[in-house]
Amino acid sequence: MSAAVETGWIGRSLERREDARLLTGRGEYLADVRVSDCLHVCFVRSSHAHARIKDIRLDAALEIPGVVGAITGAELSREIQGQKIPVLIPAFPAKYRQYWPLAVDEVYWHGEPLAAIVAKDKYVAEDAAAAVEIDYEPLPVVTDAEVALREDSPRVYDDWDSNEIFGTSYTGGFEADQIAKNDAEVEALFAQADVVLRQRFRTQRCGVCPIETRGALAIWSETDGLTVHLTTQRPHIERLALADLLELSTAEVRVVAPRDQGGGFGVKAPFYREHVVVCHLARKLGRPVRWIETREEHLMTVSQERDQIHDLEIAADREGRILALRNRGIGDVGDGRQGVYWGFVMPSLGSVMLPNAYGIRHADIKLRCAVTNKACMSPSRSFGALPTRFALERGLDMLARKLGLETAALKRRNLVTEFPFISVTGVHHDSGNYVKAWDKLVESVDLPGFRALQEEARASGRYIGIGFACGAEFSGIPSDVLVPLENQPGYGVVTMRIDPRGKIAIHEGDAPQGQSHETTMAQVAADAFGIHPDDVSVRHGDTGTTPLSSGTIGARGASYTVAAIAEAAAALKAKMARYMIHDHGLEGATADDFSFRGGAVIYEKDGNIRREFAALADRIVMGSINLPAGEDPGLEHTAYFEAPKPMICFTAQAAKVEVDIETGQFTILDYATCEDVGTVINPIVVEGQVQGGVVQGMSNAMFEEFLYDENGQQLTADFENYRLASAADVPNVTVGHSPTPCPDHPLGVRAVGEGRPGPVPGALANAICDALAPFGVESTTLPLKPEMILALIEAGRAGNGG
Amino acid sequence: MKPALFAYVAPQSVEEALELLASDEMARPLAGGQSLIPTMNFRIAAPSALVDLRRIGALNGHAVEGDVIRVGAMTRQRDLERDEAVQRANPLIAEVLGNVAHIVIRNRGTVGGSIAHADAAAELPCMLVATGGTVVARRAGGERTIAAEDFFLFHMTTALEAVELLTEVRIPALPPHTGYAFQEVARRHGDYALAGVCALVTLKDGVCSAVRLAACGVASKPTRLAEAEAALLGAPPEGEALARAAEAARDYATAADDRQASTDYRRDLASALVRRTVTKAADRARERA
Ligand SMILES: Cc1cc2nc3c(=O)[nH]c(=O)nc-3n(C[C@H](O)[C@H](O)[C@H](O)COP(=O)(O)OP(=O)(O)OC[C@H]3O[C@@H](n4cnc5c(N)ncnc54)[C@H](O)[C@@H]3O)c2cc1C
């Protein structure tokens, strides 16, 4: 029992309990897991974007001292299952292509693994990988989704009738005639509209890069089977998949996500083929085998998202009210062979999220996704929605300029005001007050003052601008959405255990990678039981000790898992109250008559009747005689939380920039947000999520870009060429709040993790275009390269007649 | 990624280092390692041995001697940047170094390493060309001094021979009545310049009595902008003359289109940067007068 027990832990800026070990170099990352006798894997990857593998010769590699073994795709395919099992396949129609963890016969993208070397250390493994000789017969390459969708395009898979892996309409219904009817209604609205904006928007292939790359450490035991330490956001899903693929009983597979992971952001959510190979090799060789992905491999294979084109049309009236929306999206999914998301789930959700926080009643939204000879798109924070956020936020600014309206006012006019609201694409906006948050943001940036400043600056040849954007984002993902989308449950679940000394252990099957679960979840439990957070431990990531959950994805932590903690606490408190009633003979009393505070359980009607929290726990767990009627001993409860309806959170964002019209360079003068995350559990954690999310959006908007040449060769597989923003390139973000507690969450919490990067490119580009309005600059592509901006200025000057 | 196998030696003297280099033509000197080690990790370079220069006392240290600043090859970039005597003798040096990578990299990166590496977009080589500095190269039994403009031959190629070590860099102090400026445009803070311009403007009675301009990032090596200098010489550093100089600078941007920038954009940048650096240098020259 801690000495001074305060209460009211929710809402406090408690220092992160993870920080002490992380900041003193004592984090426990995958590479820190020690095992003796461990071997290292290096993957041999295709140097061609599309080719037939004619021959692989391993002899020279195997002769290098220190090399223990090697395997090719052909060998592996005889030893394990093909990678296509229900838990990894979404429940809607698309072309899910069977594939092997190592390429067999043919490679489809530059970087595809086709063999693996096992050696005593990483150095030797790389030497040997370089010694593998491969004969390729090059095949036609397609690297552009629009080209890939043409009838005469070379096929990525020659047995497919087209390169379209997935395509659908998000509006009108599921039947063709319903959709046609809807499309005709939308067309009629366009025909009547005062103004129509038509524009193509393009977002480049980019994503998020965790500092820690991927990795796996597989240990095989004849008695216990497979234990694999894995960088993953979803250890339980990995376990099921690995067991199926390796034809092991699930009883023989334990997946452990390390206590600390150096970021994930979605990148560690798919099921990756490398994992299977590492596990198989450990089993085959009977020795521990580790793979730590190099940065080059990482940039060649994952973190690639956002690759979308949108032909957007907005019909509006003279006041800027949106009458209807039409969008034709194209997603470039790469090879489209990756467990769980298959490259197209991201653009698909992006289309679902397109209408954003705007109360759009009529829309015709369709998407086509194509496979290309590029790495498969894998998820990145803001999952699929950053491109559609960019398109609509930019589109609305262009519309405002067309109508001569202030963009902030035009957007405000279109925000959803009545809740619950179901969007044209079926997104359920449960509650909130978007207009209030928007107004607070606009006030905080002093829009009239800025406009005056802008006038003055222009008079002296300086160009400053302001841009706005917003995001209504999922607050966790309910089973309703997750089961069809990914074929796995959305519920939040924890097992909570109270020991006889009054210490609480929370076991969650998720696998955080920097989301501060150990801090915020302890705060929530401490608050519920009136004890100190130091008396609460949070354990995660080990499938051997935690309940099955779909993982740390989609902002599920504070929304779903925390809600499960609140429910588990309520159940255990009720049980403790029943013991109090029994032990003290308080017939007629109910759980509500007891308060948990100051480390004690107190009968509110008679303060003399109280028990130390730990003493009561000891009584229930250890003193298992004289039980209340029908009561079990022990204090353990597993709670499942499922919100009755999907929940949502909101962010409004504003950027101020200055553009140098001689070089096209711009400086972010200020960046502000206003958040509705409902009840804030820990303000510094929320702030960290917003700062980090916004910075990732800035980095995507300004610098990051995966490039392939016309032969499909990847050109950006290092941090010199794939450029991330550094601290010096981004401002501190001013984070404001306008909370409305979420009615469907026991604590009123809304999530914050997923959506924050999405609105950023739109806000930044809008600010740049606002600054350059005298030149009529409208940027429609990312990244916002100074050279491109300068070209737009020059084009504007020429258009204006100099 | 991991480098291929290599040997490592850390000699105590220049003579010893030269001997080691002469005995193994695949050996390479190691200075701060900020350029060499990454290329080894990518397996672009695979030297048989690294001859680490850091224990060699004679290559460390720097001093202002009259109107020249002598900088030992192994002087860390950050040490030179922060030295007050150097700042007084030639404040351009610190202004240039502020644009080289990030502090953590300058803490390890050396002056000699940057000059020997000779990246066409690097700032220090550009500064050395602008100031008219020299490089001291030693080989077994001999030493030679090479003018900066003769030293840099091409991107990552210098007049240094495999058996030679760069031992010292000599940078002239800022001449009287002279203002200086360095500016660059890079994609991010700390990136190599897409274009950078170093300007030294000497004013006498309001007109340029001497001008030295050099650019990095725009061509295959750090380049004197002779035509731009000529446009300014004998004229006030503004108006018509400055416009002509800025125009002339365009033609020095010859680097082919690459992933970072097109030739046209580099031409625009060279021009804008000449205008800006000359103006700033002239302002400073007036302040000093
Ligand atoms: C992230 C990053 C960003 C960077 N950004 C910039 C930038 O913006 N501008 C910039 O100019 N530089 C930049 N650099 C490079 C940095 O300045 C390097 O430190 C410098 O170019 C090389 O110096 P070094 O001491 O590290 O040399 P090393 O890497 O040790 O050596 C470089 C080369 O010079 C040779 N060499 C070194 N010393 C001698 C000598 N005395 N005699 C003969 N040969 C020698 C080596 O053999 C090697 O070939 C950056 C580096 C990094 C990692």
Image (cartoon, coloured by chain):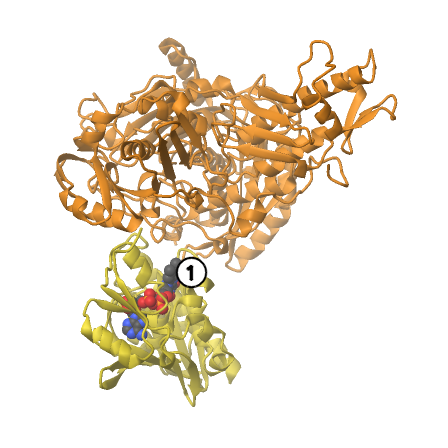
Chain colours: A orange, B yellow
Nearer to us in this view, A680 or A525: A525
Q: Nearer the viewer, residue B18 or A487?
A: B18
Q: Residue at x 51, y 34 (%)?
A: A755
Residue A473 image offset from top left, x and y in percent: 53, 30
Locate residue A239 relative to residue A126 in the image: left or right.
right
Which residue bears the numbered disc 1? Answer: B190
> Quick one: label 1, few (<14), some, or many (20+) residues within 10 Å?
some
Height in image: A383 above or below B125?
above
Q: Is residue A751 left or right of A584 when viewed as pictured?
A: left
Q: Secondary structure at mark 1?
A: loop
User: Residue B165 lies in what quarter of the image?
Assistant: bottom left
Task: Please report the residue visible at 58 percent of the width from the left and 34 percent of the height from the top.
Answer: A538
Note whether residue A476 is visible: yes
In terms of image quarters, where does ligand 1 lie?
bottom left
- Residue projecting furthest to the bottom: B66
Whole-percent x, y for residue A626 in the image = 74, 14
Subunit of label 1:
B
- Image quadrant for the C terminus of chain A? bottom left
Compared to A293, does B280 lie above or below? below
- Residue A624 located left or right of residue A767: right
User: Could you tell me the amino acid type at mark 1?
Assistant: Gly
Q: Is mark 1 within 8 Å of ligand 1?
A: yes
Q: Nearer the viewer, residue B208 or A644?
A: A644
- Image quadrant where one finds the N terminus of chain A: top right
Nearer-the-camera pick, A259 or A179? A259
Q: Using the rendered image of the protein, determine whether residue A348 is visible from the camera's viewpoint.
A: no
